[in-house]
Amino acid sequence: MNLFTKLQNIVTTSRITNDPAELYCYSSDASYIRGTPDYVVMPCNTAEVSEIVKLANKHRIPLVARGAGTGLAGGAVPLCGGIVLDMSRMNKIIDIDILDLQVEVEPGLIHADLNRALEPHGFFFPPDPGSSEMCTLGGLIANRGSGMRSVKYGTVTDYVLDLEIVMPDGAVIWTGGRVMKSASGYDLTALMVGSEGTLGVITRARLKIHPLPEVRAAVLAHFNDQEAAGRTVSAIMSSGIVPSACELMDSTTIKAINTYNAELGLPDCEALLLIEVDGAQCSIESDAASVANCCRELGAFDVKIAHSEVEMKELWAARRLAGAAVTRLNPGKTRVYIGEDVAVPLSAIPQMLKKIRAISRKHDLTIMTYGHAGDGNLHTGMAIDTLDKDQWDVLKRAADDIHKAALELGGTVSGEHGIGSARGEYMNQEHGGALDVMIAIKKALDPHNIMNPQKVGLE
């Protein structure tokens, strides 16, 4: 009996394919990385995942779990062929437990769908990725994602209480429990969060939820000095007020967004900060005023406070366009996600902004910079003619300079998008001997190296 037939016996004919046209659809994520699987299998429950993993382990076949394919580092790309597990059919909300402030979900559930289900209860799941309407919770957890409101609410790591994991031998374990904290044994939940499918397959997740804030307000501050905007971030974060979000956009990003949609009318300046505060009605006015005053004191030439939902929706709509807008500055070119997710200490933000500008000049390459400045996570955007090998070479050299600049400032090559196969070469430089420990864990749990091989710099 061949492997296709064995897989077919687990999931039925309608949920497996080796058709070249369909396999091509699974050969990439949102990054530039490419690799074609031999089979795509669509499990509907944990038992099926377990049987598929057992089969892959027995025959030493690479296996890659995939959600919506919105990853930006090649994490769900099957570099070694083998089986892609399309987890999108495992997309149910198992339980909403308001009394215990938690939900239980399957990994294929779309992030925004969970928050739509929680809103009538007055709750939400705070991690807020830009791809909320597309990305799955399993992928968000596997990549240790976060988003715009991680400044106040933290990353997905802070919200995962328990995970059901199919291990590389097909065994099924739970890593945590229903309690809000535990000091019992190794923290296997934390180990699995951010492991990018290299240690097992997430089949269920128990997540903490948070009450929706009573009100929100947004402060928009315009600067003629990009580094002054960077210094303002540190000042706000050390002022005693914790904003729910603190976003930065440089002049190139502003120009790109206005070109994309002129009606948004962002001001012509070197940089702007979009800072959101939320909480009780009694405190929001004073918090917003304090943030606004801090911005003025550090050099903002114009500061506005938005209170209405309409105003704030427009501001956030502009911010969410940043990822796509870079191509409007370079007609006919394509954005390539590379060097796009560095993070540095808050005090190093001005230096990192300065270094990115220097890298842009050095390579004569337009680079827009924006991102979650409140936790030091900066995104860069670059676009090239992807059919031009010389432009690829320039792009990769610029990305290499960006990664190395972040590391020199005590930062990381990935704040929230993951390592995948795009950034593995920097893992030793960033982690040193700790990488050897990661490799030892990988070998102990996955001795045949079937789980998402050639990822996270573990080989």
Image: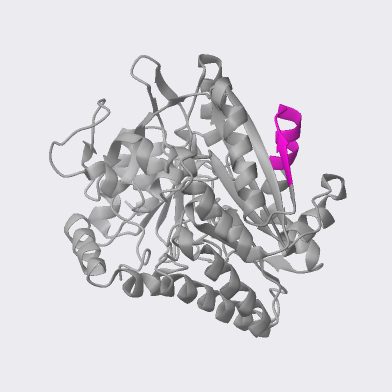
Whether 20 is drawn above or below 116: the answer is below
Residue 213's x, y, as percent?
53, 24
Q: Which residue occupies the foreground of this view, 346 or 421?
A: 346
The residue located at (58%, 28%) in the rendering is 284
Query: Is residue 269 among what the camera can see?
Result: yes
Query: Is residue 133 among what the camera can see?
Result: no
Q: Which residue, as the protein is rendered here, is positioned at the far front?
A: 297
The residue located at (24%, 29%) in the rendering is 177
Give the mark count: 0
Query: Residue 20 falls in which quadrant of the image?
Result: bottom right
Q: Which residue occupies the foreground of this view, 414 or 212?
A: 212
Image side of residue 197 versus residue 446, left or right: right
Residue 347's x, y, as percent?
47, 62
Quarter of the image containing the C terminus?
bottom left
Q: Which residue occupies the foreground of this view, 321 or 291?
A: 291
Residue 91's x, y, as percent?
47, 31
Whether 130 is drawn above or below 102: the answer is below
Q: Is residue 149 covered in magenta?
A: no
User: Which region shows up in magenta?
Assistant: 303-316
Whether 390 is drawn above or below 208: the answer is below
Image side of residue 237 versus residue 158, left or right: right
Q: Is residue 305 covered in magenta?
A: yes
Residue 443's x, y, as percent?
20, 62
